[in-house]
């Protein structure tokens, strides 16, 4: 059964139930009201009878005689009964209750004059007598009441009377409510249907499919989350495609070279010693490039799948950092670059020395690769608080017993090289992303992606600032 049908049926059931409860309550309220009206009418009519009865009893008129006369005066309002204060009926014309006892329990509890009450007596099941009684004097030393009685109108008679209007009102309410329920069910079900269609579209591979996300209710939020998810899926798919294309391309270029030069060796095109040496060198370089690429890919895959366990050693960067930089001094000297290190005293951090060296070496390597000869490369390191906390906020932190803002170590590698264009900056840490000069420099475009993964795995972050033609600064932030 569809959601729409289920919603509709639920609505209709609730509407029916409400109407039924309403109808039954209304019938009971009406019956009560009717009883009050009947009792009030009897009460009004019995008062004048009491005067006459009193006079007759004083004159010792027999109860039956008195009854006949009183009934004449009462007319069609009700039948007269003469009852003792114990409930014994002394005379009754209509109900055959003479010499029987009736229930003298009052049904109306409101303040009534002394010697006056309203009552109800069940003659037999389904037939109830309503009466208003008033004290009329004494017969043979017993207090007697004159009562005016009438049949209570049966419940179903009341229902019959109002039934038609009740049905009409109920019918109109039902039709209107069902119409509203249909609209409501449709408005709830339609966005869900659209979402289902969109999910199916994504499953079919139409990753650009989106749904309309209106409103801030649950369905609106669901639609927004769906769109966000679809965007992620689309991006992931695109990255996957790009990745495969990039890997194939990166592997194909050196392979073509290797194939070409080995072919030249085989068919004797490079038969002189210099030619053979050149071919072998190219094959060697290209194979090394492929090995580097495959190595980088493996590193990335291992980091991503969590298969690269990071050591958690206590590291003293005051000692380590100069050593890491020193390893590249020879290369810097060869390119004519100046390597300057400016280190503040640093607190210890917890991390993997090998991996962090890989990151710093990669930044230095890039700085050397993308710098003009004779450029300057500066490595600075200092310890900073991430939040420049004001005195009051420190006091506040203390007050709520939370740790103060974390301290960080910042390592920056600044070069005076080519710089990076603003278009390239946001994509620099993506895999295989390479700037214009990179093709010449022979990089794989994976270095910064790996660096970022490793820094993030240490709980840190890596950022870049650059000005085209003036140089770049890569900054690593690591928690103390
Ligand atoms: P690659 O192997 O190409 O160096 P990276 O991931 O290390 O790959 O760097 C990505 C790209 O970022 C490089 O191709 C280059 O265009 C740019 N880049 C990185 N470092 C620098 C730098 N210091 N100066 C200018 N460009 C840089």
Image (cartoon, rainbow, N blue to C red):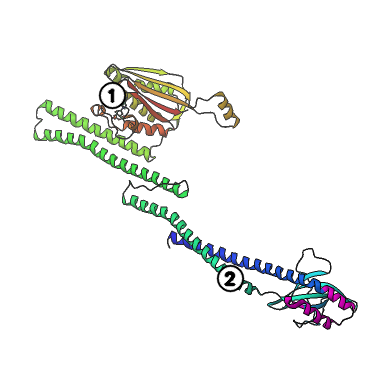
Name the residue that disc number 1 marks.
369
Residue 131 rendering spot, x and y as whole percentages: 76, 73
Give the camera-side residue of 106 and 324.
Answer: 106
Name the residue that disc number 2 marks.
163
For label 1, the crowd category at 10 Å Cα-Cα, with few meaning under 14, some 14 to 19 and many 20 or more, is: many
For label 2, the crowd category at 10 Å Cα-Cα, with few meaning under 14, some 14 to 19 and many 20 or more, is: some
Determine if the C-beta at disc 1 is less than 8 A from ligand 1.
Answer: yes
- Please tell me whether mark 1 or mark 2 is closer to you in this view: 2
Verify CB contact (< 8 Å) between mark 1 and mark 2. Answer: no
Determine if the C-beta at disc 2 is less than 8 A from ligand 1.
Answer: no
Q: Report helix, strand or loop for mark 2.
A: helix
Q: Which one is earlier in the sequence, the residue at label 1 or at label 2? A: 2
Q: Which residue is drawn at 24% across and 34% down?
A: 290
In the image, residue 13 sits, relative to residue 291, either above or below, namely below
Magenta run includes residue 38: no
Q: Which residue lies furthest to the right in this view?
A: 141
Residue range of the region highlighted in magenta in the rendering: 50-79
Is residue 31 among the parts visible in the rendering?
A: yes
In the drawing, does residue 87 fall left or right of residue 171?
right
Residue 362 rendering spot, x and y as whole percentages: 33, 27
In the drawing, does residue 323 fall left or right of residue 70?
left
Q: Quadrant of the N terminus?
A: bottom left
Residue 279's quadrant in the figure? top left
In the drawing, does residue 411 fall left or right of residue 388?
left
Residue 441's quadrant in the figure? top left
Residue 99 rendering spot, x and y as whole percentages: 81, 82
Give the camera-side residue of 19 and 311.
Answer: 19
Q: Quadrant of ligand 1?
A: top left
Q: Report helix, strand or loop for mark 1.
A: helix
In the image, residue 248 sits, relative to residue 375, either above or below, namely below
């Amino acid at each position: 059964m569809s959601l729409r049908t289920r919603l509709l049926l639920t609505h209709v059931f609730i509407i029916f139930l409400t109407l039924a409860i309403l109808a039954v309550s209304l019938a009971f309220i009406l019956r009560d009201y009717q009883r009050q009206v009947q009792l009030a009418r009897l009460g009004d009519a019995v008062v004048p009878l009491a005067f006459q009865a009193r006079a007759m009893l004083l004159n010792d008129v027999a109860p039956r005689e008195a009854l006949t006369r009183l009934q004449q005066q009462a007319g069609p309002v009700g039948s007269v009964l003469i009852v003792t204060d114990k409930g014994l009926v002394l005379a009754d014309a209509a109900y055959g209750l003479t010499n029987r006892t009736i229930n003298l329990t009052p049904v109306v509890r409101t303040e009534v004059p002394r010697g006056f009450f309203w009552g109800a007596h069940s003659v037999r099941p389904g037939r109830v007598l309503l009466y208003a009684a008033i004290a009329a004097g004494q017969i043979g030393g017993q207090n007697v009441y004159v009562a005016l009685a009438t049949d209570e109108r049966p419940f179903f008679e009341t229902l019959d009377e109002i039934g038609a209007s009740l049905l009409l009102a109920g019918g109109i309410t039902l039709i209107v409510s069902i119409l509203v329920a249909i609209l409501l069910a449709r408005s709830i079900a339609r966005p869900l249907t659209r979402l289902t269609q969109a999910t199916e579209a994504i499953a079919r591979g139409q990753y650009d499919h989106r749904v309309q996300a209106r409103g801030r209710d649950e369905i609106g939020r669901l639609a927004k989350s769906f769109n966000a998810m679809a965007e992620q899926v689309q991006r992931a798919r695109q990255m996957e495609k790009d990745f495969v294309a990039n890997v194939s391309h990166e592997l194909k270029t050196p392979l073509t070279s290797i194939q070409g030069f080995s072919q030249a060796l085989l068919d004797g095109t490079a038969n002189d010693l210099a030619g053979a040496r050149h071919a072998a060198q190219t094959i060697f370089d290209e194979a090394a490039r492929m090995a580097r690429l495959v190595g980088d890919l493996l590193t990335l895959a291992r980091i991503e799948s969590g298969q690269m366990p990071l050591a958690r050693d206590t590291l003293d960067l005051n000692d380590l950092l100069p050593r890491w930089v020193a390893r590249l001094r020879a290369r810097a000297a060869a390119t004519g670059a100046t390597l300057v290190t400016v280190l503040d005293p640093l607190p210890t951090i917890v991390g993997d020395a090998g991996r962090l060296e890989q990151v710093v070496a990669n930044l230095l390597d890039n700085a050397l690769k993308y710098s003009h000869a004779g450029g300057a490369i500066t490595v600075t390191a200092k310890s900073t608080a991430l939040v420049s906390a004001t005195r009051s906020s420190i006091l506040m932190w203390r007050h709520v017993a939370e740790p103060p803002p974390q301290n960080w170590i910042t390592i920056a590698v600044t070069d005076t090289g080519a710089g990076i264009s603003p278009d390239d900056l946001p994509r620099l840490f993506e895999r295989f992303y390479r700037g214009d000069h990179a093709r010449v420099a022979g990089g794989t475009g994976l270095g910064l992606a790996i660096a970022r993964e490793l820094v993030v795995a240490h709980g840190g972050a890596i950022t870049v600032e650059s000005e085209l033609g003036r140089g770049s600064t890569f900054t690593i932030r690591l928690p103390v």
